[in-house]
Amino acid sequence: GAALDSSLATLPIGKAQLRHSGTRIALLGFGATVDAAEAVGRALGLTVVNMRFVKPLDKAMLLELAKTHDGFVTIEDNVVAGGAGSGVSELLNAEAITLPMLHLGLPDSFQHHASREDLLAEAGIDQAG
């Protein structure tokens, strides 16, 4: 087997990572969308979180953000229907928290063959979108 790099840290399961502390809106990035979310969030002064996990979601982080922000935007490179953003909505609903939410991701339809970058741009979930 290959030797492991001893500088690698253990990633805590179910714990999100605060990438930028901002105000009003929290951008919740899942997977490969985090870097674009961070660039946009920093430019607009928004909070940016690398959610890292869809299951389990970081309930403590989400509940704290819900207390201090006016809304959430979830961003994922997956189909929105039944995706990570839906999980966030379900968690808040179970806690009786009402918060404006916008879920960004791929449409629930057949995706034609294209590069990953082209598909993200077409769905409006790249840095330019």
Image (tube, rainbow, N blue to C red):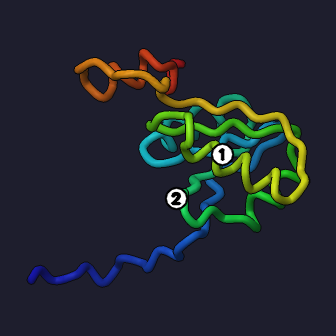
The residue wearing badge 1 is 48
Tell me the kind of residue under disc 1. Answer: Val
From the image, state whether disc 1 or disc 2 is nearer to you: 2
Q: Position of residue 110 (x, y in %)?
A: 35, 22
x 42%, y 43%: residue:
32
**In what element is the residue under mark 2?**
loop
x 52%, y 31%: residue:
105
Q: Position of residue 79 (x, y in %)?
A: 48, 34
Q: Quick check: 115 above or below 64?
A: above
The residue wearing badge 2 is 52
Q: Residues within 10 Å of mark 1 (few under 14, many from 20)?
A: many
Q: Quick check: 13 above or below 79?
A: below
x 57%, y 47%: residue:
84
Q: Determine the residue located farthest toward the left in the rendered image.
A: 1
Q: Nearer the viewer, residue 62 or 92?
A: 92
Q: Position of residue 103 (x, y in %)?
A: 64, 33
x 63%, y 39%: residue:
74
Tell me the kind of residue under disc 2. Answer: Arg
Image check: 14 left or right of 73? left
Q: Residues within 10 Å of mark 2 (few under 14, many from 20)?
A: many
Image quadrant occupied by the C terminus: top right
Quadrant of residue 51 within the rendered picture: bottom right
Q: Position of residue 30 (x, y in %)?
A: 52, 47
Distance from disc 1 to disc 2, alpha carbons, whole Å, reads 12 Å
Image quadrant occupied by the N terminus: bottom left
Image check: 64 left or right of 36? right
Image check: 98 left or right of 53? right
Q: Quick check: 109 above or below 86?
A: above
**In what element is the residue under mark 1?**
strand
Quadrant of residue 111 within the rendered picture: top left
